[in-house]
Amino acid sequence: MSDPEIGTAIETCGYLTNVHDQGEGKPVVLLHGSGAGVSAWANWRNLIPKLSDRYRVLAPDLAGFGYTEIPASFEYRFMETWIEQLEALLDALGVASAHWVGNSFGGALALWMAALRPDLCDRLVLMGPGGWPTKVNENLEALWSYKPSVENMKGLMDIMAFDRTLVTDELAELRYRATVRPGAQERFEQIFPPPHQRWLDAQALSIEMLQSISNDVLIIHGRDDRVVDPQSSWHLHQHLARSQLHYIGQCGHWTQIEHPTRFQTLVQHFLDEAG
């Protein structure tokens, strides 16, 4: 049986990017977060079929994650590595511009794309996003310090979710197995070697950059997020001229999983406004 996490391999920047390409219409790019074992499919598997009814959905595995293949000697340059990857991906797929939906680290990346390549960006949706200067807390520290075991993975998922009943042994086992694929943990540790504060700093945009972004922006954040401080989204909202902010109570860092119907409705209505 084929692995649903594997999409199409596209040549980008000298390596192959794994991307899910579904639906027709205005392109929407989905950017996943930075957790251990994450992939585009794991992050967006519930949203892809909903959006692909009316949009062309592109969900890539960013360099260092999922099934995107990179050389063993690959060197990361925050945030240039992923900006260049996305530029090359859109060029290879013949996409002139797109809406962008970014989760956590992916939200920060969407903001960087809008600031540096506004020609490629239409509307932005940011979910529990990075991008605002803040200190690494103990929960993010745990996320980026992960060592593979089912117990450690379940501990991370407990941090992510407000409702702990979502953290089943089956789900923890599934995510754990993703972290022990050949080379997966080595790539993950190569992206975020300690000290971790420098990688959080590298995601932050200056106020001038934020104020230069003229896109319509929807920010969605779990009020009870223990990984990314919900106040970060409030600060982003103050400097993004055309933004709206939605907080969801009894919700942690997994908005799209903890409140899937509400999340999908907010995203679809916001994108549909663009016509």
Image (cartoon, grey):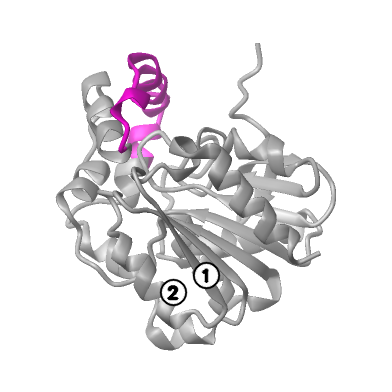
- Please tell me whether residue 208 is drawn above or below residue 151 in the rendered image: below
Quarter of the figure with residue 156: top left
**Residue 252: mark in rendering:** none
What residue is at 20 percent from the left and 46 percent from the top?
Answer: 139
Between 141 and 74, the residue placed more toward the observer is: 141
What residue is at 62 percent from the left and 76 percent from the top?
Answer: 215
Q: Are marks 2 and 1 in contact (CB under 8 Å)?
A: yes
**Residue 249 appears anywhere in the view:** yes
**First to last magenta residue range:** 162-187
Quarter of the figure with residue 157: top left
Q: Quadrant of the C terminus?
A: bottom right
Q: Position of residue 188 (x, y in %)?
A: 35, 42
Residue that extends furthest to the front in the rendered view of this protein: 249
Q: Which residue is mark 2?
A: 237
Between 189 and 206, the residue placed more toward the observer is: 206
Q: Is residue 6 left or right of residue 253?
A: right
Q: Which residue is mark 1?
A: 244
- Please tell me whether residue 37 is drawn above or below residue 121 in the rendered image: above
Q: Position of residue 212 (x, y in %)?
A: 53, 86
Q: Is residue 44 left or right of residue 163?
A: right
**Residue 88 appears anywhere in the view:** no
**Mark found first going from the N terminus, 2 or 1:** 2
State the CA–CA distance, disc 2 to disc 1.
7 Å
Between 130 and 256, the residue placed more toward the observer is: 256
Q: Position of residue 106 (x, y in %)?
A: 48, 55
Between 1 and 136, the residue placed more toward the observer is: 136
